[in-house]
Image (spheres, rainbow, N blue to C red):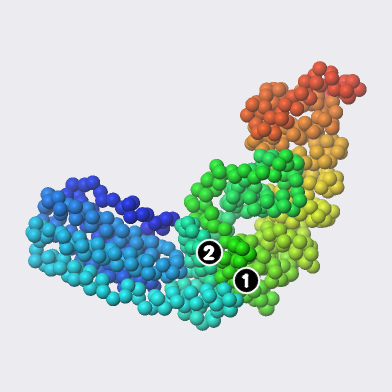
Amino acid sequence: MAVSPQIFPPRKRRPSAGAFISPTLSDLKLVESLLILSQEVSSMKPLQFLLQRSCLSIIRKVKLLSLFFEELLANQVSFFSPPTVLCFEEMYIVLQRMKTLIEDCYNGSKMWLLMQIETAANNFHELTIDLSTLLDIMPLQELHLSQDVEDVVVLIKKQCSKRTKGALVDSKDDKIRLQVLTTLDQIKKEIVPDHSILKQMFESLGLRDSSACKEEIESLEEEIQNQTDQKSKHFAAALIGLVRYTKCVLFGTSVQKSDSRRRRKKSASDANVPADFRCPISLELMRSPVVVATGQTYDRQSISLWIESGHNTCPKTGQTLAHTNLVTNTALKNLIALWCREQRIPFDYAASSEKVNGVVTNKAALEATKMTASFLINKLATSQSMEAANDAVYELRSLSKTDSDSRACIAEAGAIALLARHLGPDTASRLPNLQVNAVTTILNLSILEANKTRIMETEGALNGVIEVLRSGATWEAKGNAAATIFSLSGVHAHRKTLGRKTRVVKGLMDLVKGGPTSSKRDALVAILNLAGDRETVGRLVERGIVEIVAEAMDVLPEESVTILEAVVKRGGLTAIVAAYNTIKKLCILLREGSDTSRESAAATLVTICRKGGSEMVADIAAVPGIERVIWELMESGTARARRKAAALLRILRRWAAGLDARSSSTTTTTTTAMTNSRIVLPS
């Protein structure tokens, strides 16, 4: 029975020739290993669409060769001459290379294999020559073979000699390659390819449905990671653009039906991206994590846009940046790269077009993206049913996740207004998945800085997002609406606009109170951005934000305490009073929380003490073991945490020494507070 090469895991990088070594075994064991290896190669399924003749020829020769090794084992020869052993060892390496070559051709990208068809055919040819050479120098007279097996060896030699003549690349393979190159050249010239030619090309490669095209895109993305020169990366990106366009125009309407099972698995994988690997600004997986002056980590592209937009504060903490230097977080980048490799997610691929002297070096990929976006948007605009619209929106959602060029092309083609039509309650009640896809696409588009203004200015878009936030059909829809608010509020002017909308503030706070953990997190990070505006903080405090984040602190301590720090800092005495009942939780976080939450807890307690007066200081001072906890933070916390802990310790000691100027008027009250309401940290 033929064995499919799919049982072998695909390689990220092909091994070098030096990686193949023969085993150090006794003569008989070496022959046994050769027999097993030859049987593995001969049982592999031949390539189906490219290099069929070359692959089948190799497999047939190795199948005949296995008879040779069977004869040797049957003769029970336990010792061979050194020249024979050397031939066997070299033959083992040749068989390993054959097996690896077939595996790689089978498991890799068909498009990339097509573009490298001459190299691959030459590899098959070289292996055939190597096998022929080894058989020529093999001292067969020493092996006492039967006449039948000797005839088989002679036959293999003749077949090897025959294969070395004539063209290495099959004419049909060369024809398909020429068609692909011609199509890429047409796309580069902004000529829409003929759909019948696309269909013929893709059928010839075995790419006959949406699922096969998606797998091909993933294989090309992996191939990009295997390349070291930019020219190869750009060429592979152009092929991705071609496959993605063809998938949409030929098979796009069946994506969610035929590929729904695969899509659900992919969505689950997306949802499981570790929180520490997501950029706090874009919420996307960080490709180039960098550390800013406050010690927080962001994706380089996102924080660079933030700083270039005129901001001088840390988006997460609200602190003024002492400097704008960005330091690569190498340790985190390595962890993300390792995780991506395990999940088969491309990591170091940046698909956006680069410019050299003002010229786009990857024009074919960019034009293919424009054609794909235009096709999908036209399909969405002319859809006669919600199901048809959902197919188009789902494809736009997938495309908008890929890179900045895609987000720009989709928005520039007018997608935002069309997407906004599907955010309302009518869509939610009739086809909830369409609403989820629409709001998620807008979220993806908002990652691009230029699109934030487009969304804010497009009629119905912002109101649609707010409607989903308030009454979305699913928690996923509400959470992605909250994430969109967070993304839009990255622009200072938009932050003020959003903060003044009562429905935005109430929707986010309701989501924190009643949503699942993932949706709570989306809402909390949006609230944190809005809390950067002092006017908005007042509205948040009036609506009970302090109490809400205090409850959320049990589930999402880092996000909650960071918001509390921002609110207390900008909310005045009202916020301080509201935060009174959270002191116990802050003290617990000071001891048990993560580095980030301990840092924010210390900063919040310092602000409470400075603005809240002696009563607040007395309650903190009454916590058993508080000084020991502060000392521990001063020794093991982040730089900012150590500074805040030192400031908190000074405040407590000044209060204990009676040096607080406000303490004289509140001594009685403070003593009563310390007596009646001591805060106890759990042991």
- For label 1, the SS is helix
Residue at position x 63%, y 64% from top? 358
Q: Position of residue 592 (x, y in %)?
A: 65, 32
- Is any part of residue 474 visible from this angle? no
Residue 370's label in the rendered image is 1
Q: Nearer the viewer, residue 171 or 355?
A: 355
Between 658 and 406, which is closer to the camera in this rendering?
406
Q: Earlier in the sequence, mark 1 or mark 2?
A: 2
Disc assigned to residue 258: none
Assess disc 1: are there few (<14), some (14-19) or many (≥20) residues with their C-alpha within 10 Å of its C-alpha: many
Q: Residue at x 81, y 55 (%)?
A: 493
Q: Around disc 2, counting alpha carbons within 10 Å, would you say few (fewer than 14), some (14 to 19), or many (20 or more)? A: many
- Asked if the residues shown at circle 1 and circle 2 are in contact, with their CB atoms under 8 angstroms apart, the answer is no
Residue 236 location (% of width, % of height): 50, 65
Is residue 164 found left or right of 145 in the rendered image?
right
Indicate which disc residue 234 carries.
2
Q: Amino acid at mark 1?
A: Lys
Which image quarter holds the N terminus? bottom left
At x 91%, y 22%, the residue is 665
x, y percent for residue 158: 19, 71
In percent of width and height, residue 114 lies at 42, 70
